[in-house]
Image (cartoon, grey):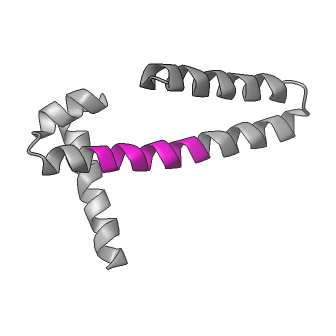
Amino acid sequence: MSSDAMVRELTADVAHFCAHTRTLAPGQRLRLITELRNGLERVTGQALDEGMQAARSQGGGLRRVGEAAGLSHEKVRYRLAQNDLRNGADR
């Protein structure tokens, strides 16, 4: 399966999940959507940071990495610095 197809499939799964929540009580619906959003942000954010770090370690400039990630070079610099601080605290 191609990467594009995998993204489409995951997006469809998320859309299906969200459609299912429409039948729930508003409080339960909001809780589930919030949990999903937070979980996706955590997973995709970590993967994005790891990808940016890999690109930088292979000589990619901040602007080029930012362009590929859809972020400004300053945001890339900030996220990489934050990641370095977190990793330094783990050591």
Image quarter hosting the C terminus: bottom left
Residue 15 at x, y percent in the picture? 68, 22
Our reading of the magenta stretch's main secondary structure is helix
The extreme bottom residue here reads 91
Quadrant in the picture for residue 13 = top right
Residue 74 at x, y percent in the picture? 19, 40
The answer to whether 18 appears left or right of 70 in the picture is right
Quadrant in the picture for residue 64 = top left
Q: How many marks?
A: 0
Query: Does 74 appear above or below 90?
Result: above
Residue 61 at x, y percent in the picture? 9, 39
Query: Does 86 appear above or below 78?
Result: below
Q: Is residue 65 magenta?
A: no
Residue 29 at x, y percent in the picture? 81, 35
Who is closer to the viewer here, 50 or 25? 50
The answer to whether 21 appears left or right of 15 in the picture is right
Who is closer to the viewer here, 1 or 73? 1
Which residue is rendered at x = 23% and y = 48% of the image? Answer: 54
Query: Does 44 appear above or below 86?
Result: above
Which residue is rendered at x = 29% and y = 32% of the image? Answer: 69
The extreme front residue here reads 1
Q: Is residue 44 magenta?
A: yes
Which residue is rendered at x = 64% and y = 21% of the image? Answer: 12
Which residue is rendered at x = 86% and y = 33% of the image? Answer: 26
- Which residues make up the magenta segment? 39-51
The answer to whether 91 appears left or right of 30 in the picture is left
